[in-house]
Image (tube, helix red, strand yellow):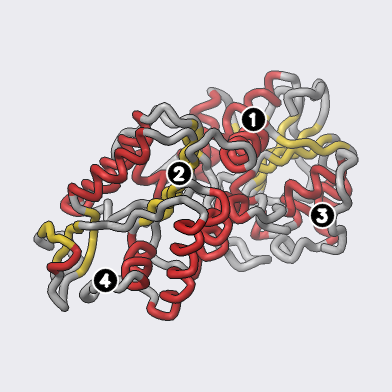
Amino acid sequence: MTDMSLVNTKVFFRADLNVPCDENGQISDDTRIKASLPGISAAINQGAAVMIASHLGRPTEGRFDSRYSLAPIANAISSRLGQEVKLIKDWFGGFNVRPGEVVLLENCRFNVGEKENDERLSQKIANLCDVYVNDAFASAHRKEASTHGVAKYAKTVCAGPLMTKEVLALSKALENPTAPLVAVVGGSKVSTKLPVLNRLAESVDHLILGGGIANTFLLSQGNSIGRSLAEKPMVQQAAEIFNRIVQKGGTCPLPSDVVVSKKLEKTAIAVEKQMGELDPDDLILDIGPDTINKFKDILKEAGTIVWNGPVGVFELNQFSKGTKALAKAVEESEAFSIAGGGDTIAAINKFSISQLDYISTAGGAFLEFLEGRTLPAIEILNFRAGGEPADLKG
């Protein structure tokens, strides 16, 4: 987008403003709004008439639901831009937006056919604008009317600055990384991140694991984990990934000491134990100090760090030391560092981490990019730019 002239053009600006809101409808984390503002401001400053679109949550198509209205987001954007941002409820009923002005179109998932990438809806969206800008990397893995279909029919299409930054940062980390490449992957289930783990096993020098994923890998190496969260059906695959990394000269360092409790609750008492000392009813909820130091040493020597997921139940302070120490180690490392995913961003915000090279706003798209998948929203932009053919069948 920044390479184009947008003077006196109507710009349909697809952002990802799918922010968490509390029970009162108030925005609880505006990270994605802040990340989208530079692109929106650049379009306004060029003299474009800007129509912003986004989804929020998972409403029922064809039915307005105030719980999923973008009204709070319109207010937030208006406050940050210092100008009025009207919320347009009826996209196709006719509305005015002049050069230098900006409106926010109501939740795109209220439109029938959005999630199915409906052709007629895509064409109607394309007819609203002169230029379609996709700045929603966090939704790039979704093949929907406002992220994919419209890009087939709009007169001119381009990537927004946030989309561009995300793709360049991830490509630098994965396609031509400075060695050693260290990946930190946390989360509850191996099964949900199996494609990522399989790809990383081929490319990383060190794979640091946390949460339930680490527990499953601990089981695969014959360790007792008490009552801790793990996926027993995934033990064999975990063992295979572990062996592949080791056989190619890499490491997959597993916790040697952990922080456990009998229950997962706010008042739970945290106890440090060596891995061989766990009781049958212990729950592993964080990594211990020896493991923290081991992980910090690896991160200190890294050339590139990719981080997705915490290594403990960081939401509870007594089980947050591991994730906090890891976050600080990534921040202090001289490596090129990129982090992404909802829980990762929550940890970054909680521990006031600011010195990473890139913090991705994406969750699912971040993971699918790590897996090496072609993201539909990026594929169609490449096709319109004269690149490889895209699947144009919806």
Q: CA distance from mark 4 to mark 1?
A: 52 Å
Q: Earlier in the sequence, mark 4 or mark 2?
A: 2
Left or right: 306, with 22 as reference point? right
Residue 110: tell me if it is visible. Answer: yes
Observer-nearest residue: 288 or 163?
288
Report if residue 66 is visible in the image: no
Q: CA distance from mark 2 to mark 1?
A: 34 Å
Residue beneath the point at 23% across and 57% down: 256
Q: Residue 320 at x, y = what percent?
A: 23, 49
Do the residues under discs 4 and 1 have CB atoms within 8 angstroms?
no
Q: Which mark is residue 122?
A: 3
Amino acid type, label 3: Ser
Mark 4 or 3: the one toward you: 4
Crowding around mark 4 (Cα neighbors within 10 Å: few <14, some 14 to 19, many 20+) is some
In the image, farthest residue toward the bottom:
233
For the point 30% across and 40% down, which residue is it?
296
Q: Residue at x 72, y 58 (%)?
A: 144
